[in-house]
Amino acid sequence: MRPEAATYDACAGTVAGTVRLSQSIGSGCRRMGVAASVRTSARVVVAAAAAVLAVSCSNDAGGSAVTVGAGDSAQSRLIAEMYAQALSRAGVHAVTKSLGQRSDYLAALDAGALTMVGDTSGDLLRAFDSSSTAALPDKDAATELAAQTTSEPAPATTAPTRSVAGDLSRAVPEGLAVSDIADGTDLRPQLVLSAAAAGRYAKSLTDLAPHCAELSVGIATGHELDPLRVSPDPGRDVLTPLRSTYGCAITRHTEFASDSQLRAALNQGRVDAGVFTSAAALLPGGAGDLVPVTDPKYAFRAQNVIPLSRQGSLDRRELKALNGVAGELTTAELTTLVRRVRDDHAPVGELARTWLDEHNL
């Protein structure tokens, strides 16, 4: 049952119960010979009680409801539905509301028209602090990366390693706060090899870097895989970070207006490798024969699902419900569900409900 229906039924049942109580009082008073005056009093009591309950129900269904915002994309609506249903299962009246682009729902959140939104960490950081250069998801990732590279020569200058989660926490406007990231989700731009090139080249950027000059590389632009994401600039967002992070110097590249056009070029052998605007698994039908290349040093900024809410609007129980989603959600599950909503037009509410059931949330 939808949360709003459950709230409505609960309120209706309470009012009906009060009316039944008045009828019982009236019946007893008739036997005592004072039916008329008591019935009048009972009607006054019932009217007052109904008015109080009506106000209470109105507040529950409106003012005190948790409103989860979403943007105009299958991914955003699915994430919003997961969070809203998780909150409903924790006993909260939660509803979703779609509001177009990222700027639209962030403005609504700031104005108090929304309680929270679900978004991706790197995209939110770009919206709040375009000057941040953080790419690693969190401090744990920074520590792990440092441990892996201790045998490498130390750089001439050292600076504290910054994380997307850390910079985002500092960048959110006053009155807003972020909760736990879903660290099992990875929606970064992704480098892949064609099926033919995969037999000749390494599957990690660390090992592939010395051979980057040999590759013909396609770079997708546009918004196909995530309509809310800013279209990448091939030089600034792809070529430069690959070169500065790994020494991967791409000398031959072609730009494509969409991810689907890039996939066609890869499948036809027109390019050896390609960089998609998000996870290749979001392509219609999935990645197919394309082979992902791992990016352990995060040349491409981390993009994890994360809740953003009005500060103090969610209590400990509600935050625990959101954290439950964060602890279970994975890239494979999310991308499969997004494709079902976007390409197969599956009901987003039913998919979210089934996923929550499967994870006992």
Image: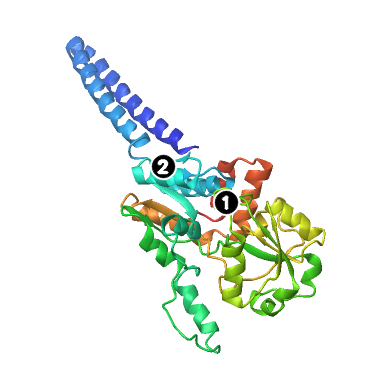
Please tell me whether mark 2 or mark 1 is closer to you in this view. Answer: 2
Please name the residue shown 25% across and 20% down the image.
Answer: 47
Q: Amino acid at mark 2?
A: Thr
Mark 1 crowdedness (10 Å alpha carbons): few <14, some 14-19, many ≥20? some
* Residue that carries the numbered disc 2 in the rendered image: 67
Q: Residue at x 29, y 29 (%)?
A: 55
| Viewer-closest of 175 and 3 | 175
Q: 84 left or right of 216?
A: left
What residue sits right under mark 1 in the picture? 355
Q: Position of residue 95 (x, y in %)?
A: 44, 40
Q: Quadrant of residue 316?
A: bottom left
**For the residues bearing labels 2 and 1, Cβ distance under 8 angstroms:** no
Task: Say whether disc 2 or disc 1 marks the residue closer to the N-terminus.
Answer: 2
Q: Residue at x 64, y 49 (%)?
A: 224
* Image quarter of residue 198: bottom right
Q: Is residue 290 visible?
A: yes
Q: Which image quadrant is residue 29 in?
A: top left
Q: Identity of the amino acid at label 1?
A: Trp
Say whether residue 224 is left or right of residue 198: left
How crowded pointer 2 is (Cα within 10 Å; few <14, some 14-19, many 20+) is rated as many
- Position of 336 with respect to 181 (left or right) is right
Closer to the camera, 230 or 15? 230
Label placed on residue 331: none
**Residue 91 in view:** no
